[in-house]
Amino acid sequence: MSKLYSMTGFASVRGALRDDLAFTLTMKSVNHRFLDLSLRMPSYCDGLEMQMRRVLKEKLRRGHVDVALQMERRTNAEVQLNAGLLDAYVRAFREAAVAHGLASEPDLNAMLRIPGVMSAESSVDAEDTPTLEAAVLAQVGPLVEKLNEARAHEGAALAAELRGSMLRLRAFGEEMAGLRNGVREAQFERLRARLAELTQGVAVTEERVLAEAAVLAEKSDIEEEIVRLRTHIDRFLAMLDAGGELGKRLDFLLQELNREANTMLSKTSGATGVNSLRITEIGLEMKAEIEKAREQVQNIE
């Protein structure tokens, strides 16, 4: 039995190049039809990014996956001032003040908070780049394992919810199967009364009534749909038990289940009586349950 994986998860790992330089690697995934990788890394990590993409494509199958690498200097971080950028902002401020006739000077505290004006040095020297690449790539495997642990935990919860949905659908189907005979009898009596009304008292043979009833029963009988409903539910549960990459196949089965529910509603729409009303209610409840299950399946790998 294989595990069932959700496409939703989060994981992070930490590593170090030396005592004063460390990094954090995070990975977050959400549902997507295909594998969609988005990597956010420092500008000097272009080569590392290409290697990570290749590794991740081998280890992951579906989902939108965000990966981020953040470098951290633990001690003696050097704060850098972008003097040229600060000068440009000051000049622009003063020119705007003159243009609008304002006597004002820029607030230095506000200027220093402008993105890019000040930064803490966290880049890696060229000679450290190979060491960084090796250290980060060594953490990709453990990171994916942690992500898959989170996704497997979420997948188990999804599987439990889907099993509950299938059991409810099965119960609806069995109740509908028990009500269909009462609907057939009600339709037969309705047909007899309608024929009597149309013929205005002219005697109608029992054979004629039975022939018309047979045609009506053929059009409104839902036995085949109930049988297919049971088959689809059994197949769905068996696939959940087997695990693996099931998202697309489960979604297809739910489309088939929805088709059976629609057909049953269509065939019984013209019926009357308490049983027929309950069948309509069951059909609508089935469609709501199937739609809920489809939303859950969208998160399964």
Image (cartoon, helix red, strand yellow):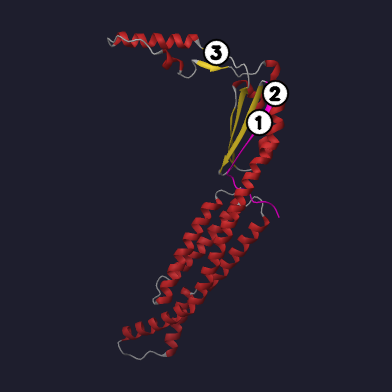
Q: Position of residue 132 (x, y in %)?
A: 69, 23
Task: Residue 77: name its quadrant.
Answer: top right
What range is drawn magenta here?
1-19
Identified by mark 1, the residue type is Arg
Numbered disc 2: secondary structure: strand
Camera sees residue 89: yes
Q: Marks 2 and 3: in contact by CB < 8 Å?
A: no
Magenta region includes residue 4: yes
Disc 2: which residue: 17
Earlier-in-chain disc, 3 versus 2: 2
In percent of width and height, residue 188 lies at 42, 82
| Spatial CA span between label 1 and label 3 | 25 Å
The one of 246 and 144 positioned closer to us in this rendering: 144
Which residue is under mark 3? 80
Q: Does 148 sit above or below residue 19?
A: below
Residue underneath mark 1: 14
Tell me, yes or no, whether the highlighted magenta stretch contains residue 90. Answer: no
Name the element at disc 1. Answer: strand
Image: 160 above or below 71: below
The residues bearing labels 2 and 1 have C-alpha atoms spaced at a distance of 11 Å
Quadrant of the rendering where the N terminus is positioned: bottom right
Q: x and y percent of residue 122 in the render?
A: 60, 19
Secondary structure beneath dot 3 equals strand
Regarding residue 222, the answer to whether it shows in the image is: no
